[in-house]
Image (cartoon, rainbow, N blue to C red):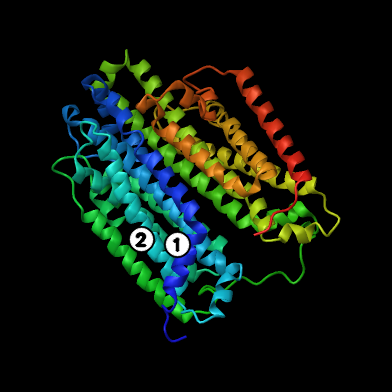
Amino acid sequence: MKQPFYKTGVLFRALLKRDWLKLLFWILGMLAFAASGAGKMEVASNPATANSLYTMFVKNPAMIGLFGPTPVNSPANYSLGPIFGQTMTLITGITFAIISIIYVVNRSRKEEDDGITELFRSYSIGKLANTTALVIELIFLHLLMAILLAFSIQAQNVAGLNDLGSNLLFAFTTSAQGLLWGMFALLLGQVFSDASATKGVTFGLFGLLYIIRMGTDATNLSLGWFNPLSWVYLAFPYVKGHENWTSVILTFSLSLILLVISYFLELKRDVGAGYLPEGQGRAQGKKALFGFPGLILSLEKKMILGWLIGSFVLGLVYGSMFGQMDQFISSNKTVKEIFVGNETAASAIRGNFMVTLFSILSILVAAFGVILLIKMVGEERRNRLEALYALPLSRAKVYFTYVLTAIFSVIVAQFLALLGIFIEQLGNENVLSFTEIMKSGMIWLVAVIFVLAILSLLMGLVPRFADVIWVYLGFLLFMTYLGKLLNLPKWLENLSIYSQIPKLPVEKMNLPTVSLILILALVLILIGYKAYERRDLITG
């Protein structure tokens, strides 16, 4: 086919027809995540609260590493707009990026793995038609989300968030990140020969740039202009005199460059192939492959190993923040005014920082567990489990292998992250003990296991809706990240399992509550198994 874009329109309409419901949920979810809290943030706009938030978020380098920087240089100017811009811009851009990476890989490289692209190519369809249809959909989707996001914030008419230009800047700078990382995923999908490697490398690059921006934000902010992920907040929406559209222009320009390179690479390669050679397999399989657990570990070992290494490295990065926080506590006079005494100030700030850090870290670990466990549904849809069940293999062994592999993996990942934190902060003046870090950090695994138990129940009862777990995980991130700041209703807070976990070391251990959550998790897993044992396998 000499016309590479032939039938792009047909594939675009087919793509919309297939994914319109998923895209609708995506749009509504992002609006709920990014815009719903705008009005609630009025509680942060009174002078006393703003002064405390300025000290904690603008002056504390550890919190800057988590939330991003702001050019505001006095508490008087740290009003609702800059507060919303600093706390929401990075997390919203990250959310856009993660969803885009997953969607683009699933609709490009993964469809090649499943033979769908090869089927398309057997008809009179251009070589770049499917990719172009996906790109057009992604562009329209992010433009629509940017416009809806800006006007949904504007419609709330909250003082400090009612400037349409600032709202458009916030919406476009965050949605542009989604488009950019979609193009990164598309490009890397041409280089690697399977969806798993593409997704892993893309997220690896994303994590690397995230770690780099944590360092440059605290030392030299101008270096952030060399980091595409930093562009999401360098537009500084809602900070008068510092707002600029340069980062948006740079993001769209880099997206275009990545798209052109992707086109060139795709034209030169065969369907299903990549530019990096695939590793040679063993002449004879390992004995472990003769058992189902060994097969699962063999298939997922690269992904598991990557997450474990990433967790440890992230722990090292987060551990370096404790030293920055100690310097902040000892040198900041405002801290001594907010808290009574230096020791009280240090313990209160360090304790609350540990709660925030460990809870966010555990949500990332929960995402790892969800990715690992939900693969059971993916294998089922591709009829691979049906072939295995032709052998003397019980459903109990399949179900509990996936569940226990996910649970064991998240436990190891959380431990390695906390170990990295402990090792990195050993050189600080106020060193936290190994027991203190592990006790305060490992308790969050109770919530992680409960999330996996919910997913187990969904896979057993309604496997086609197992992806709903990502909505709940996003809700947990939102509540953990901004729940207290927004002063949301108690009933909404109670929907988050993270609100039930004892916040060590700030709070005391609540063994009855922890035990009850673990018992409920076990019950959900068992109900999920019973439902899985009785239902038919799904396909497609």
Q: Residue at x 46, y 20 (%)?
A: 506
Q: Which mark is residue 185?
A: 1
Q: Quadrant of the C terminus?
A: bottom right
Relative horizontal placement of residue 214, taking residue 19 as reference (left or right): left
Does residue 510 sit above or below 460 in this rendering?
above
Which circle's residue, 2 or 1, is located before the other in the chain?
A: 2
- In the rendered image, residue 319, in percent from the top left (x then y), is placed at 44, 37
The residue nearer to you, when weighing 507 against 534, is 534
- In the rendered image, residue 167, in percent from the top left (x then y), is placed at 24, 43
The amino acid type of the residue labelled 2 equals: Ile
The amino acid type of the residue labelled 1 equals: Ala
Q: Residue at x 53, y 31 (%)?
A: 441
Q: Rounded to the nearest whole Å, what is the CA distance between mark 2 and mark 1?
A: 14 Å
Bin the neighbour count of mark 2 within 10 Å (Cα to Cα): few under 14, some 14-19, many 20 and up.
some
Outermost residue, bottom direction?
2
The residue nearer to you, when weighing 517 against 37, is 37
Task: Name the residue that disc number 2 marks.
Answer: 139
For mark 2, give the secondary structure: helix
